[in-house]
């Protein structure tokens, strides 16, 4: 590992001008290429205190052994040179998008005497016109088969063409009218080239001209009573329309545009591109990349533009490119695209209308592509084994952690504090053993704190204590750990009436709560590794809880989300796993799943609290009888003003229950008034139709806002 100060350029040596720089390792291999508006300012950022650098940047500068640069005159030249060097050197620390497949194109070889229509993959050739890319080659063949009725262009290989010319007999397509048979001289080279050019015009979206021309010819043939010719033209029109229907109109103004969307997390990013020509989606492609450097969405978009248009010129670069975030700075990228097209290119973020709606579709495709990529990666047995081995090595464990439990705390500004526990066995989620906790502010019979407020550390200590205190108690009683109280299994919303106040709020997420013999479900074994969502404080709290219980054979670590660093108890410095580590990827999946599970439960509790009313405090009054009361009286206001005898008229409501209902209304605070948001007028309760007391109804006006952006 090199010290960056050993190869840092001398002060004043770096020019203050645009340019491109390269970091090389001790073997002179280029490991990173970057561009800058000011080389002096940009390179100075790499030679600051290592503690202030992003972990990935820190790894890059300590791997490098030298840095060199090239000065250019403009930022556009810097952009072009950066792309050329990334393509030439393939640096390990640069973002590189990788296709999961070689996408097929519909190609027309306009550089040949007799142009040929065919499916092509790989590098593009000069003089060949390309359409696509398509998701599948069969989609190209279906489209071509329909169009050959109207544009009978050659589709045969060079060998077949020469053999037909030698024998004077065309192939089958020539006999059935789907090839103009230039091999036997049925059409001149110039006429065939013009036919291929018309085929290309139709594929670029200029469809109206040919349809109108064929319709006119069909009408003239019918008027002249040439019905067979009119029928053939009718069939040609039908074939063209059927080919057009394969690509539905998505933009009504016949727009030529490419839409680029990005889905990303801390480790990877997926890019999806929709190619729209003539208002129709003509092709789609996607890439996935590892984020080996600290990078913004705008920078990801810039790298995608370089890869997408670096080898393209002319009409292959559309007039409009729609993106989720703009590169910074925007002007050099836009000038570069304009130079490659030869005319102005608009690079912008769609804000409304059809283009915004289509961009949302592309974004969903990008998100699904990222999820699919992660699913494939997680399902590989070899990859999972390597991930567990890397975790064991990084954390200095005796063996691979076959069972990992991860804990996360979630609340909304200190309210509805809950926790989650997720379980991964052999690198795969075991959802049947997930658990949820309500934070009570106590451990055992001791009230430690009030259980409210944003104190994730004490919440983490409580959760770990409750979970493993129960483990020890069950192990002592039965010799094995049984989850839940067999006599009274509480839930996260209602922990039951167990005599053990420390019983965890276990709500098993499974189809059955018992084994075949009727006993409660068991965990297979305690975890080898406990992961907490957080840094040093949360790890210390979890370790302290285990120490207080006398448990010393379970490892603990924390994963801090900001920098994806792993914290161990008692260590002042985190463990930074390599960027490409499968172990880091698995820990991230575990942590993200715990976070998702905790937030889902917290939102459920919050929604239930917002809908709560006086009827919820009446013992034994379930949802069915609540609905019956509201239906009988028509509104909560009429129910409040009803007498005991009137309430007893509701089926299933006795006198004692009616008295309890009125007592609950008497002790409850008056409901917040409903407000017409359009006029600001305070409405009568019956007029509004909703109250905070109505079971299953929307939240009344005046209820706290949904501040999901402030959840943790």
Image (cartoon, rainbow, N blue to C red):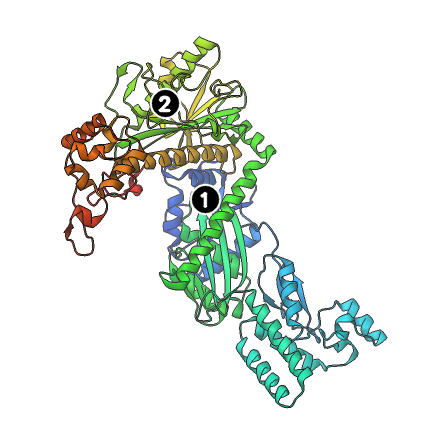
In the picture, measured across the screen, residue 394 lies left or right of residue 631, that is: right
Instruction: Say if 527 sits above or below 296 in the image.
Output: above
- Residue displayed at 44% across by 9% down: 476
- Where's residue 267, x and y in %? 46, 41
Q: Residues within 10 Å of mark 2 (few under 14, many from 20)?
A: some
Q: Nearer the viewer, residue 522 or 591?
A: 522
Label 1 with label 2: CB-CB less than 8 Å: no
Which numbered dot is residue 451? none
Which residue bears the numbered disc 1? 293
Residue 632 picture quarter: top left
Marks 1 and 2, how far apart at CA: 47 Å
Compare marks 1 and 2 and give the one earlier in the sequence: 1
Q: Nearer the viewer, residue 216 or 202?
A: 216
Residue 435 seen in the figure: yes
- Where's residue 243, x and y in %? 59, 68
- Where's residue 242, x and y in %? 59, 69
Residue 194 seen in the figure: no
In the picture, measured across the screen, residue 279 lies left or right of residue 132, that is: left
Instruction: Say if 167 sits above or below 223 in the image.
Output: above
Instruction: Say if 536 sits above or below 305 in the image.
Output: above
User: Which residue in the rendered view is the most extreme toward the right?
Assistant: 167
Count of marks overlaid on the render: 2
Q: Nearer the viewer, mark 1 or mark 2?
A: 2
- Residue displayed at 27% across by 22% down: 441
Which residue bears the numbered disc 2? 490
SS at mark 1 in the image: loop
In the picture, measured across the screen, residue 148 lies left or right of residue 51, that is: right
- Residue displayed at 31% across by 28% down: 456
SS at mark 2 in the image: loop
- Where's residue 503, x and y in %? 36, 18
- Residue displayed at 64% across by 69% down: 146
């Amino acid at each position: 590992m090199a010290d960056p100060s050993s190869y840092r350029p001398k002060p004043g040596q770096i020019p203050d001008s645009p340019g491109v720089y390269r970091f090389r390792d001790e073997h002179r291999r280029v490991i990173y290429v970057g561009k800058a508006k000011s080389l002096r300012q940009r390179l100075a950022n790499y030679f600051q205190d290592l503690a202030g650098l992003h972990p990935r940047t820190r790894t890059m500068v300590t791997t490098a052994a030298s840095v060199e640069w090239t000065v250019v005159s403009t930022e556009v030249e810097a952009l072009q040179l950066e792309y050329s060097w990334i393509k030439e050197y393939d640096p390990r620390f640069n973002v590189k998008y990788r296709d999961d497949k070689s996408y097929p194109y519909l190609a027309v070889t306009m550089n040949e005497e007799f142009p040929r229509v065919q499916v092509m993959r790989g590098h593009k050739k000069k003089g060949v016109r390309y359409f696509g890319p398509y998701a599948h080659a069969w989609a190209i063949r279906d489209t071509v088969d329909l169009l050959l009725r109207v544009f009978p262009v050659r589709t045969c290989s060079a060998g077949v063409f020469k053999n037909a010319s030698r024998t004077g007999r065309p192939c089958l397509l020539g006999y059935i009218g789907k090839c103009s048979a230039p091999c036997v001289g049925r059409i001149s080279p110039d006429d065939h080239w013009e036919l291929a050019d018309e085929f290309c015009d139709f594929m670029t979206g200029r469809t109206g001209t040919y349809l109108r021309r064929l319709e006119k010819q069909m009408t003239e043939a019918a008027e002249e009573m040439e019905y067979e010719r009119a029928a053939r033209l009718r069939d040609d029109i039908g074939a063209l329309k059927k080919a057009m229907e394969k690509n539905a109109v998505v933009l009504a103004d016949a727009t030529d545009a490419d839409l680029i969307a990005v889905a990303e997390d801390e480790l990877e990013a997926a890019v999806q591109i929709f190619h729209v020509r003539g208002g129709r989606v003509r092709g789609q492609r996607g890439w996935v990349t590892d984020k080996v450097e600290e990078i913004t969405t705008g920078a990801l978009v810039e790298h995608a533009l370089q890869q997408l248009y670096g080898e393209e010129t002319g009409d292959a670069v559309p007039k409009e490119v729609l993106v989720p975030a703009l590169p910074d700075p925007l002007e050099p990228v836009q000038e570069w695209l304009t130079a490659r097209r030869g005319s102005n290119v608009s690079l912008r973020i769609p804000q409304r209308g059809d283009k915004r709606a289509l961009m949302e579709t592309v974004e969903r495709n990008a998100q699904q592509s990222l999820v699919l990529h992660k699913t494939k990666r997680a399902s590989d047995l070899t990859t999972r084994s390597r991930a567990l081995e890397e975790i064991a090595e990084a954390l200095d464990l005796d063996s691979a952690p076959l069972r990992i439990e991860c804990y996360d705390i979630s609340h909304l500004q200190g309210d509805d504090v809950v926790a989650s526990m997720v379980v991964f066995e052999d690198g795969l989620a075991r959802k049947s053993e997930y658990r949820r906790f309500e934070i009570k502010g106590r451990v055992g019979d001791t009230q430690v704190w009030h259980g409210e407020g944003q104190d994730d550390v004490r919440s983490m200590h409580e959760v770990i204590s409750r979970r493993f205190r129960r483990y020890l108690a069950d192990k002592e009683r039965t010799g094995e750990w049984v989850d839940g109280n067999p006599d009274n299994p509480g839930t996260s919303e209602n922990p039951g009436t167990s005599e053990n106040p420390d019983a965890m709020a276990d709500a098993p997420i499974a189809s059955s709560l018992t084994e075949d013999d009727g006993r409660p479900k068991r965990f297979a074994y305690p975890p080898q590794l406990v992961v907490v969502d957080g840094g040093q404080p949360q790890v210390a709290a979890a370790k302290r809880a285990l120490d207080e219980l006398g448990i010393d054979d379970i490892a603990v670590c924390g994963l801090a989300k900001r920098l994806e660093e792993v914290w161990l108890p008692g260590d002042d410095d985190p463990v930074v796993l390599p960027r490409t580590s499968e172990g880091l990827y698995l820990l991230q999946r575990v942590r993200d799943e715990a976070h998702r599970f905790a937030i889902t439960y917290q939102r459920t509790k919050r929604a239930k609290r917002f809908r709560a009313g006086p009827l919820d405090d009446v013992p034994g009054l379930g949802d069915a009888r609540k609905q019956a009361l509201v239906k009988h009286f028509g509104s909560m206001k009429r129910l409040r003003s009803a007498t005991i005898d009137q309430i007893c008229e509701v089926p299933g409501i006795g006198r004692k229950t009616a008295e309890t209902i009125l007592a609950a209304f008497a002790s409850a605070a008056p409901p917040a008034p409903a407000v017409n948001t359009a006029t600001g007028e305070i409405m009568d309760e019956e007029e509004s139709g909703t109250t905070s007391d109505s079971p299953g109804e929307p939240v009344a006006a005046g209820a706290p806002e949904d501040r999901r952006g402030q959840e943790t």
